[in-house]
Amino acid sequence: MSNSLEDDSDNFEVTPWKVEGAVDYDRLIKKFGTQEITDEILEKIQSFTGQLHPLLEHRFFFSHRDLDWILNKYEKDEKFYLYTGRGPSGMVHLGHLMPWFLTKHLQDKFDSNLLFQITDDEKFLFGNKTMDEINKNVYENILDIIAIGFKKSRTKIIVNSRHIKHLYSNSLEIAKRITFSTAKSVFGFTNSTNVGMIGFPPLQAVPCFLPTIIEGKPTPVLIPAAIDQDPYWRLTRDIAEKIGFYKPAQIHSKFLPSLQTTGKMSSSNPETALFTTDEPKIIEEKVSNAFTGGQPTTALQKKLGGNPGICSVFSYLKFLFDTSRESNQRELKCRSGNLLCGECKHDLSDHSTTFISMFQERRQKAKDLVPEYMYSEDG
């Protein structure tokens, strides 16, 4: 099954390299063949953690593969590793942080080890940046990863081009079992696709199996990531048991919307995103120009109310800053015409400025910690 959603009835597209349009997540679950996260699964998570992370409570994480299975393993005293990653195409924005926030929460609550893969090779093969440009992004992205607050003793960062000796032999075992026909079907490769791109997927699969090698016994792995990365794990799951490993489990997030459209935030268009390196004045300007679900005039807003369902400002506040109660109250006031867009923009600007300022302080401190987070066979 192709990961791309491109038939005539679709108005959005989701691939590992491109997300366009207003994504219908219910339809995406059906297209990708994943499962919706149920109330029962959330209750089970809460029984272990004591509380639900807001990103779970608000259903920003909405889909999974074998999440129930990995929770059952944990219930039987079989601990799991976490694995997530970053493609260093540019600087990090708030949308990139969303899966990392949940990953940190899961690490803290389940006392899990984390492998964090940086796919610098992929971004060279799949884009038009030089390796020098990508290497600069790698360093900056590592600072963001460390600034999230992952436990140093339980977190190892893998940069593909630098740690290839730890990945290559296992990637061969994976590559040998994936046919070009299968890869073409999943990723949509064509005759004009460079062979590096075709050969890359096994390298992204390796960290799914490293925990078993590290621990010397079958070890479950859970991958928190945005839904666009699912095709890689679909391919990995198909061959996992053939080479003696558990299938990796997944928990999928939605996309934080662009500030200016209903589509996904994008690093390639800086005006659509809030970056962790933005200065307060830039944040204020971006938020002031953000797309909202409000009416054209104040009078109409008070009369007809707004539509928070399509409002980027509301989405940012809901998923990043508001409590559930605050978000519900904000929605009611918006729909009833008792809240103006300028008030929400003011709240988002204040919250974002405060958060990013604090985050930048942690990024600065991270510069002294980089070597301690890097992967090695000695741990």
Image: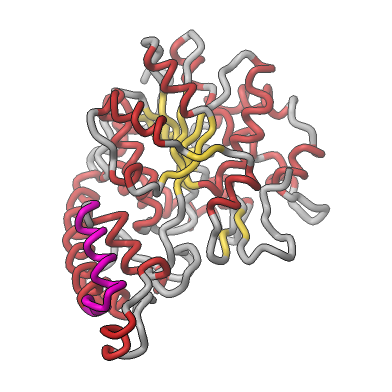
Answer whether residue 181 is visible to the viewer in this image.
yes
Locate residue 326, reporting x and y percent. Answer: 20, 58
Q: Residue at x 20, y 76 (%)?
A: 343
Of residues 152 and 164, the one nearer the viewer is 152
On the rendered structure, is 309 left or right of 345?
right
Q: Quadrant of the C terminus?
A: top left
Of residues 372 and 229, the one nearer the viewer is 229
Image-quadrant location for residue 360: bottom left
Q: Determine if the magenta segment contains residue 121.
A: no
On the rendered structure, is 304 left or right of 134?
left
Image-quadrant location for residue 301: bottom left
Residue 379 to residue 309: above or below: above
Residue 260 to residue 47: above or below: below
Locate residue 247, reporting x and y percent. Answer: 57, 23
Answer whether residue 292 is visible to the viewer in this image.
no
Residue 220 to residue 265: above or below: above
Q: Residue at x 24, y 39 (%)?
A: 149
Q: Residue at x 41, y 58 (%)?
A: 256
Please tell me whether the stretch drawn in magenta is mainly helix, strand or loop.
helix
Of residues 357 and 140, the one nearer the viewer is 357
Locate residue 35, reporting x and y percent. Answer: 55, 37
**Which contiguous range is marked in magenta?**
324-342
Q: Residue at x 53, y 65 (%)?
A: 22
Q: Determine if the magenta segment contains residue 327.
A: yes
Q: Quadrant of the N terminus?
A: top right
Locate residue 33, reporting x and y percent. Answer: 63, 40
